[in-house]
Image: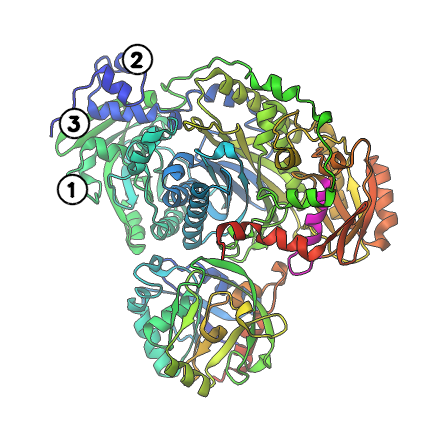
């Protein structure tokens, strides 16, 4: 199926080109950039909030981005059931906007971390993970604030509603502190909202979707989305 | 506001000498006023004028090859890489600011070099850095190291350019004066690059980007003296970086260049408005009439002197095409950046500066700049006395260590040898999804989307070699950076250099400098890698220490087809291991000598440029014929270190090896010799015959020294556990920096 993707460009977004490249040139989908000062989502089927440092991460990651004109439209779109996928800074913007529960605080070691890590899909029914069949994937992380945190009650509801998509793990799907790069509660790497149309993850699937770079696991997440999207 | 009266004493306080002050008076036919003195003092500082280096720099090969823009012509050099594309690259130092304020010093170093690239119209695609600190055992070093790495990371990560390669060395000589060199590489379509010039009478001169504050005043002058106890008080000379604004400035600048709205553009680094207005005017053989009242300020009550000398970051000076200024403004507004017309281009060659209705300066632009009226000095040279001692040190009398395995583990644990993972994991090395080979191999490789091409990039310099023999040591720096690029599959294209030396007024320092330039010129001519530009940083001395002369080479190589990218580590069990090149058991200046015997002496290894060039041809031939699975050069720590690195460099998949190395005199010498022009390659058994035939035809020295396989690193009679080596390699620095 061909879908139309809109990649939002905030001032300071820097993975916008990377998502665009994978969607447009590798997966051959119709893809457009959406400017933060605009409000028109151009009839996109899926909105991508890319990684980067929107508004320089000033105040808090995502705190200024959530106030930009385009986010009003994105929030409306999401509330009406539209599919929104936030990667890294995009995930941070989604939690700041209240579209996803919880928050992302500074990594446990207080340092920016960029490296290849493994995540295991723990949900096998969402748009993003259905086709993954609980597989373990290699995807890079690159963030300073990726330490997912939430209160016990929210955590419980995330678990009960099967909203946890990915957890940090070993290459053999072992989930433990040893394989938790940033201190995230329960090794959480990605979640969705209750209705299953808003997704956020800290790892970068768009960075492991090009064979030339020697990593292709991330492609499976985009493929799951394409395969299971219902227009 | 009353301004101080200009006198010779005031000029001397500004870092000028008597002759220079007299020359200024002669040029003007009068005494300069306070603002004018400020402008002259920064423009004629070592940092801006290159007054003590330019004469020698001009002896370097600065044209030829595929150079489109040579050294000194623009903000960075430009090299043709085919497919209608050019690569712009440059390296620059930010040593002094980082010595007093490591985080901002290093961050603004990255910001400055990025601006040099995108002011050419090129989009930055890679960032590199070459760092040197004192001993990691020292708490102040750890503070500086931590702050510098965080500064580089925070700036580059936010700016959105991958930091993919570099080097870090630790040595007591850098204790009081660390070296922080940042390099950037960018890509531009040929014909769409921009120039740093001001032409066309009446064209509007615009200041864009951040507003101007009091930060960084006299930064250029601060960089042109030795670090002293008073340096700490000059923290205010250190600028403060804002990578977010720089990212916006990048996008806006590329848009106005792409839309062909401008005549010229120059970034504001050292000496701010003074430097950009005078250099652009001088280049275009024109002048400028500037009204400083129009400059957006971030502080009130700033004087003309302060505005002219401010080094506030993330600013550019733009000369727009008349009639297009509104479109330029529109683009900067789109990116929420300041954009103000502050003057016009004139034809009288003068910088005419007005502020609040009052004339503040009237200076001939040409007289201010490098290549114009700025002084040019040939300094006195004298061979340093220490060389008599180091050259005659009886290396053959060194005691032979009893247990070579233990000795090796000590050398292998040296922070100079081990993986810099603690550093590069703090850098986003992958953003923009072009990084094919990231940090940790011989050179990093970045692909160019839409083509089959890739670039291999690396910085290199062994300061110890240069200290022991400036000329040969610098030849080695060029040769090794080329070898690293070759081992990644790249054909060396051109270099940029960052020349970190002590006080040029000391004849011994100037001797080191002149010899280093000689060696660099010889090696660059041999490899046909012209010098595209770079930076000279003198006065790298503190009360207690003087750094090793450290001419850092930044090399860029071209890989025509990304199928020919090579990595350093062993790939498969049973692959055969070969050594290309010969060992001469040379341990002068080696890491072994320093770590085990606490001696820095001897002559650095010999370098035969012809042999080195042959080696490059052989390795590139082996890669393109698909005859090898890995290539890693032998350098610091000798062959034993290089082999151990081949075993553990792929952290996810360490592989053991069985090795036998010939010994001519002593086993420690054979293991740790840093003889040049050597590369370790691994070959699939089924390709052995073809490999042997290829080498035979090339008539190049080659020796089969072992085989990949097993759970340990086994060399001659010494066997070491692979996991132990891997643990040392990846965790030594983090254990020193973040002890649990």
The span from disc 2 to disc 3 (Cα, nearest Å) is: 26 Å
Which one is earlier in the sequence, the residue at label 2 or at label 3? 2
For the residues marked 1 and 2, what is the alpha-carbon distance in whole angstroms? Answer: 34 Å
Q: Is residue B170 above or below residue A190?
A: above
- In front: B643, or B477? B643
Q: Residue A108, how many percent across, how many down? A: 44, 63
Disc 2, SS: helix
Chain letter of the residue carrying label 2: B
Give me the residue at 57% from left, 51% from top: B448
In the image, which disc is placed on residue B699? none
Which of the two residues, A168 or A88, is positioned nearer the viewer here?
A168
Q: Residues within 10 Å of mark 2 (few under 14, many from 20)?
A: few
Up/down of B168 relative to B708, above or below = above
Residue B359 is labelled as: 3
Q: Which residue is mark 2?
A: B18
- Label 1, secondary structure: give it: loop
> In the rendered structure, which segment of residues is drawn in magenta?
B639-654
Which residue corresponds to mark 1? B300
Depth order, front residue of B393/B214: B393
> Can the viewer see residue A213 in this picture?
yes
* First-in-chain label (1 vs 3): 1
For discs 1 and 3, the disc positioned in front in the rendered view: 1
- In reply to whether residue B651 is colored magenta, the answer given is yes
């Amino acid at each position: 199926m061909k879908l139309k993707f809109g990649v939002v460009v905030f001032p300071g977004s820097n993975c916008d080109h990377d998502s665009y490249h994978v969607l447009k040139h590798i997966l051959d989908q119709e893809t457009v950039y959406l400017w933060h000062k605009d409000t028109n989502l151009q009839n996109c089927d899926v909105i991508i909030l890319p990684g980067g440092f929107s508004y320089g991460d000033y105040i808090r990651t995502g705190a200024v981005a959530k106030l930009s004109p385009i986010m009003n439209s994105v929030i409306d779109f999401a509330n009406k059931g539209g599919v929104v996928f936030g990667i890294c800074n995009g995930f941070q913007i989604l939690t700041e906007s209240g579209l996803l529960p919880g928050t992302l605080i500074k990594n446990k070691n207080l340092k920016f971390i960029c490296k290849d890590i493994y995540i295991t899909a723990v949900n096998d029914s969402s748009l993003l993970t259905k086709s993954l069949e609980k597989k373990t994937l290699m995807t890079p992380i690159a963030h300073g604030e990726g330490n997912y945190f939430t209160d016990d009650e929210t955590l419980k509801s995330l678990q009960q509603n099967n909203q946890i998509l990915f957890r940090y793990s070993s290459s053999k799907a072992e989930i433990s502190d040893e394989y938790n790069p940033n201190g995230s509660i329960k090794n959480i790497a990605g979640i969705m909202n209750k209705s299953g149309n808003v997704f956020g993850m800290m790892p970068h699937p768009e960075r492991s979707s090009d064979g030339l770079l020697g990593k292709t696991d991330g492609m499976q997440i985009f493929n799951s989305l394409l395969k299971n999207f219902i227009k | 506001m009353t301004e101080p009266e200009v006198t010779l004493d005031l000029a001397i306080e500004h870092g000028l000498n008597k002759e220079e002050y007299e020359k200024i008076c002669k040029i003007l036919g009068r005494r300069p006023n306070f603002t004018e003195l400020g402008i002259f003092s920064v423009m004629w500082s070592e940092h801006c004028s290159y007054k003590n280096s330019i004469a020698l720099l001009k002896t370097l090969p600065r044209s030829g090859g595929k150079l489109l823009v040579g050294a000194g012509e623009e903000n960075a050099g430009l090299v043709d890489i085919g497919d209608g594309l050019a690569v712009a690259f440059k390296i620059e130092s930010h040593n002094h600011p980082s010595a007093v304020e490591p985080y901002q010093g290093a961050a603004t170093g990255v910001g400055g070099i990025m601006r040099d690239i995108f002011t050419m119209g090129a989009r930055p695609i890679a960032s590199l850095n070459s760092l040197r600190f004192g001993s990691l055992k020292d708490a102040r070093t750890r503070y500086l190291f931590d702050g510098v790495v965080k500064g580089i990371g925070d700036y580059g990560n936010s700016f959105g350019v991958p930091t993919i390669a570099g080097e870090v060395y630790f040595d007591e000589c850098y204790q009081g004066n660390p070296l922080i060199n940042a390099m950037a590489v960018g890509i531009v379509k040929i014909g769409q690059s921009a120039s740093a010039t001001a032409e066309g009478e009446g064209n509007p001169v615009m200041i864009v980007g951040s507003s101007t504050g009091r930060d960084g005043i006299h930064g250029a002058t601060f960089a042109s003296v030795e670090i002293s106890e008073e340096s700490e008080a000059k923290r205010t000379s250190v600028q403060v970086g804002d990578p977010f604004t720089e990212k916006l400035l990048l996008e806006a600048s590329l848009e106005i260049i792409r839309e062909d709205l401008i005549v010229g553009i120059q970034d504001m680094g050292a000496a701010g408005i003074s430097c950009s207005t005078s250099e652009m005017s001088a280049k275009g053989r024109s002048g400028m009439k500037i009204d400083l009242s129009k400059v957006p300020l971030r502080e009130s009550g700033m004087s003309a002197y302060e505005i002219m000398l401010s080094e506030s970051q993330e600013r550019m000076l733009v000369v727009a095409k008349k009639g297009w200024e509104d479109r330029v403004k529109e683009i900067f507004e789109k990116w929420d950046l300041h954009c103000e017309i502050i003057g016009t281009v004139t034809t009288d060659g003068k910088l005419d500066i007005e502020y609040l209705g009052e004339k503040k300066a009237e200076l001939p632009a040409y007289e201010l700049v490098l290549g114009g009226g700025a002084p040019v000095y040939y300094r006195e040279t004298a061979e340093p006395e220490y060389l008599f001692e180091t050259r005659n040190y009886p290396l053959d009398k060194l005691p032979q260590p009893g247990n070579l395995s233990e000795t090796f583990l000590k050398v292998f644990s040296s922070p100079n040898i081990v993986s810099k993972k603690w550093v590069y994991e703090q850098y986003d090395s992958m953003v923009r999804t072009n990084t094919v080979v990231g940090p940790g191999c011989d050179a990093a490789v970045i692909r160019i989307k839409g083509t089959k091409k890739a670039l291999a990039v690396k910085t290199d310099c062994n300061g110890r070699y240069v200290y022991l023999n400036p000329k040969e040591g610098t030849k080695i720096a060029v040769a090794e950076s080329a070898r690293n690029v070759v081992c990644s599959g790249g054909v060396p294209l051109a270099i940029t250099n960052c020349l970190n030396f002590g006080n040029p007024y000391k004849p011994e320092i100037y001797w080191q400098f002149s010899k280093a330039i000689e060696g660099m010129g010889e090696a660059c001519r041999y490899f046909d890698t012209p010098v595209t530009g770079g930076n000279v940083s003198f006065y790298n001395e503190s009360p207690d220490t003087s750094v090793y002369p450290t001419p850092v080479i930044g090399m860029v190589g071209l890989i025509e087809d990304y199928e020919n990218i090579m990595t350093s580590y062993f790939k498969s069990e049973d692959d055969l291991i070969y050594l290309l090149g010969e060992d001469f058991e040379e341990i002068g200046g080696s890491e072994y000598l320093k770590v085990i015997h606490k001696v820095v002496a001897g002559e650095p290894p010999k370098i035969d440029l012809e042999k080195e060039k042959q080696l490059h041809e052989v390795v590139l031939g082996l890669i393109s014929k698909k005859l090898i699975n890995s290539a890693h050069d032998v350098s610091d720590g000798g062959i034993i270190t290089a082999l151990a690195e081949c075993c553990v460099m792929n952290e996810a998949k360490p592989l053991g090896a069985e090795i036998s190395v010939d010994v001519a005199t002593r086993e420690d010498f054979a293991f740790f010799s840093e003889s040049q022009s050597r590369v370790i390659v691994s070959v699939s058994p089924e390709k052995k015959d073809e490999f042997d035939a290829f080498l035979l035809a090339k008539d190049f020295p080659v020796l089969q020294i072992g085989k990949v396989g097993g759970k340990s690193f086994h060399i001659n009679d010494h066997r070491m556990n692979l996991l132990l080596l891997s643990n040392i390699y990846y965790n030594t620095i983090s254990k020193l920096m973040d002890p649990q």
